[in-house]
Amino acid sequence: MNFLAHLFLSGSDADLRTGGFLGDFVRGPLEGKRPERIEAGIALHRHIDATSDRAEPMRAAVSLFPRPWRRWAPVALDVLFDHYLALDFDHWQGEALTPFAERCYRQLDARRAHFTNPAERFLDRMTEVNLLAAYADRATIERTLTHLSRRARRANPLAEMAPTLYRLERPLGEAFRELLPMLEANARAWRQAADRESDRRSG
């Protein structure tokens, strides 16, 4: 899952949502350098990524790609699945994408004191181009894949993968519609368990 899906799956708590955004920028053990709920959001981000990678719909989707591309297919699928989520966002979230995106930008900006420098720069750029809403535009898939290809340390096919994503649109769309409810239920259960543990410690 990419940025839009992680913000969606983090739930309505602004600190968890902030951690969901920061999960792509924070590496290593979580040692209490940020507020507890933000670090919980980072942990949730990691849990969602691991769950997605293991899920049968994702594994089936990856298997549709040529074998040399399968190592990079999950990265491309994360971008594509944000596109699918954006296209039908009101169905999944119960509200339009634009107000959701604007609320996320405000919440993240209010917590930027806890950001790494790369996360701050990305938030500025994300807000400037309204990336969350732009995921509904197919051209954003190609731009994002090209950007990720250039950032990667190893040679990769990401910049070339968009036509294959479009050719496989029907089975990949089916995989997304099967995967997202699984991730949503899993993330909800994770958040509820984290809330119970937090209540137990504070009680």
Image (cartoon, rainbow, N blue to C red):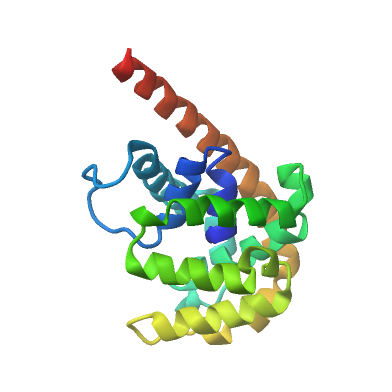
80 w.r.t. 54: above or below: below
The quadrant holding residue 12 is top right
Q: Is residue 188 left or right of residue 134?
A: left
Q: Position of residue 140 (x, y in %)?
A: 65, 76
Whole-percent x and y of residue 101? Answer: 65, 56
Q: Is residue 90 left or right of residue 140?
A: right
Dividing the picture into quadrants, the one containing residue 83 is: bottom right
Quick one: quadrant of the C terminus? top left
Left or right: 68 with respect to 138?
Answer: left
Residue 63 appearing in the image: no
Query: Quick one: 107 or 93, which is closer to the camera?
Result: 107
Residue found at x 46% / y 70%: 122
Q: Is residue 148 left or right of residue 175?
A: left
**Image point (67%, 83%), residue name:** 163
Measured as percent of width and height from the top left, residue 31 is found at 21, 44
Residue visible at 32% across and 58% down?
A: 26
Residue 17 in view here = yes
Picture layout, residue 169 above or below residue 58: below
Q: Front-most of 68 and 179?
A: 179
Relative to 137, is 92 above or below? above
* Residue in the image at 77% along x and 51% along y: 96
Q: How many marks?
A: 0
Residue 130 picture location, percent across and down: 64, 68
